[in-house]
Image (cartoon, grey):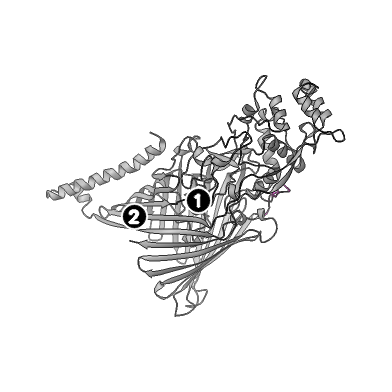
Amino acid sequence: MNRKTRWAAVALLGSGLVQAGVASAQDEGEGGDTGFFSSLFSGMDFSLGGFIRPEIAVATGDENPFNQGGNVYNGVTVARQAGDPFTAYGPVLSVPVLSGALNAIGLGSVTQPGTLLGDLLGAVPVVNGQLPIADQVARPVHSTDNTFNMMVLRGELEAGIRFSSDLSLVARVRAMYDPGVYDDINAEHLVGADGMGIVGGDPALYHHQPNFYEYRVEGDSTPNPLEWDGKNYQVYFPALFFEYNRGPLNLRLGNQQIAWGQAIFFRVLDVVDGLDLRRHSVLDNAQEEFSDKRVPSLGLRVGYQISDEWIADAYVQKFQPSIYGNPNTPYNVIPTQFTVHDLYAKGGYDDKISYGLRLKGNYGQWGFQAMAVRRYNPDGVFRWTASNVDRDLPNNNILGITENLLNNGVTGPSTGELLAQTPFEASPGGVYSANEWFHYAGMARLDAVDGLNAAITEFAPATSRLLAAPAADTQAAYNELNTFFMAAGGALRGHIAREYFAENVFGAGVSYVTEGTPGSFLDQLIINLEASYTPNRVYTAPSLSRDYLREDSAIGALVLEKYHRFTQAFPATYMVLQYMHRTKDDLFGRALKGYGGNVNAPAGGISGGANYVVFALQQPFPQDIYRVSLATLYDPRGGILVQPGIKWKPRGSITVDAFYSYINGHLGGNPNNNALSTADFADEFTLRVGYQF
């Protein structure tokens, strides 16, 4: 029995025991007897409801550049120039220097006339005493063109069983189905120079058609309890818990989501659960405040009403990480030239727990709260890892032939055996040029030069035997990268591991409700200030080094909320203005030290922290048949998201919800200096039509 099965069995066994108790109570009731169960379940009640809702998102922007079909270098011809490993990867390869260097390590005989390598070198035209090795490459993957970013049928069923005035069971099951009728890339059709496809990584994610819903980690294909997934469907319990109320005490035991804080877009005190980004990423209606995104977890939540004004809220739960979109799915944000090895199960994190305590209270017009949480950061961190793919470099180019002659598996490891000890495999669908490497490093908020050097130095001596060496500058990195892409017969795929680290998060908040002239704008204005501090938080290093970046992180947010009635003909308008400052990372938890890279330069980082401004409003019409909304998120470094929407209820059981998401991360300067450029491909119109029963 694996860990997930054990956790699920605990939850379902508890449910079964209570159901058995219900049956016993009913049996005793039929006989007219009284006893423990009949008294415990004397006030039993049952409720059932749910909805079914098709959802579509019509694309009005570009293809996702993080996927194979949206890669900006597909079909674009790029020049590649090899460098010389014996002259710090200069622009060309010098035969005398190469021969001298090989002689110095006792391998000079391989370049002598009459040898295969010597004859190959002698057959290539020499210009000014140097051997030019250069070519041109166009990424050999066709670009996709999608009309829809999402086509999903969603259903939800919620049952409530009240066994008595104190005890109840809440069960909510949710099902998603995506027919997958998109123009996408089937990885089976990607073929390398040796006629083979992608070898490394989980085949269900990297070797076939896109997998929309399965969350798979190393050593466990189903790491989430009470969740059952397939390539095109998902069924899970966002809630399955017992709730017990007795006087000031409230207990919830089972699978549940815990939401602390209520800011739109911003998560300052909302640190309990990670986010599930498989379903429409963060592009649902912003004013729903991540209600569909928090990852449920098995745990115990305890609330205690200390007084009329103060409440304590504590929890302990099984650690569940955030879930990113899978490779080549519409909202994926991890470049698919790289293979991710999630170590959630293999690293033993699936047996970890998180816990925390919050105190919240009011004193007149003032409100106060404070929290302390010990958790594993659900976002995780990434680093280079060995590919474990034993695949020789192809012999269709002089650089591959040279490497295979030097490492032929006779006197030492072969090139395939050496590459298996590095973070790379010579496979299709990877990175084809230094231009692509630098461009995508900037998009991923990584350092292109330091990333290359970390992959070399941390995986020596295998990398040094392949003649790789740390690059001193951008030009040397360009030459070295192109040398190995050419030697690979086209492309190299990178391999990265995802790990998780424990951290302490401390937070506090204060709010104040103003009083003014009744009906004035300053009357009943809610001012809320929240802040959190995490000492020694672990971030992904911009180099993807195993030596992770550690920073003391602080986050603060100021929120102004107001219901204001502008006219008696309409209900009050809800408005909110928010400002957030983050000292070390961006809105998505990425270290600011990885910002600023582009195709011509590695990341330089940004100073002064990150700032974000939100304005949102919601205006109901009379009888609440219509409700219009607007949400905007602005990054002063050059990004904006604008989301207008309208909700229509033609009947009590039918709701039509439509909204448009406009994202622009190129308002000025380098787009890799603002957070929103990551998603500015996802301009789209979303329509949801729901029937509630």
Number of residues whose C-alpha sits closer than 10 Å to that of mark 2, classed few (under 14), some (14–19) or many (20 or more): some
Which residue is at a point 70% across and 46% down the rendered structure image? 435
Q: Nearer the viewer, residue 88 or 584?
A: 88
Q: Is residue 129 left or right of residue 214?
A: right
In the structure shown, which secondary structural element does the residue marked by tag 2 occupy? strand
Q: Front-most of 627 and 609?
A: 627
Specify few, some or many for label 1: CA neighbours under 10 Å numbering under 14, 14-19, or 20 or more.
many
- Kindly identify which residue carries mark 2: 158
Counting from the top left corner in percent of width and height, residue 245 is at: 31, 53
Q: From this view, report whether residue 207 is shown above or below residue 112.
A: below
Residue 24 appears in the figure: yes
Q: Which residues are magenta?
A: 597-608
Q: Residue type at mark 2? A: Glu
**Which sits earlier in the primary sequence, circle 1 or circle 2?**
2
Label drawn at residue 277: 1
Left or right? Give the position of 99 relative to 680.
right
Q: Position of residue 110 (x, y in %)?
A: 76, 22
C-alpha separation, residue under disc 1 versus residue under disc 2? 23 Å
Q: Is residue 355 magenta?
A: no
Q: Name which residue lies at 65% across and 33% down.
A: 458
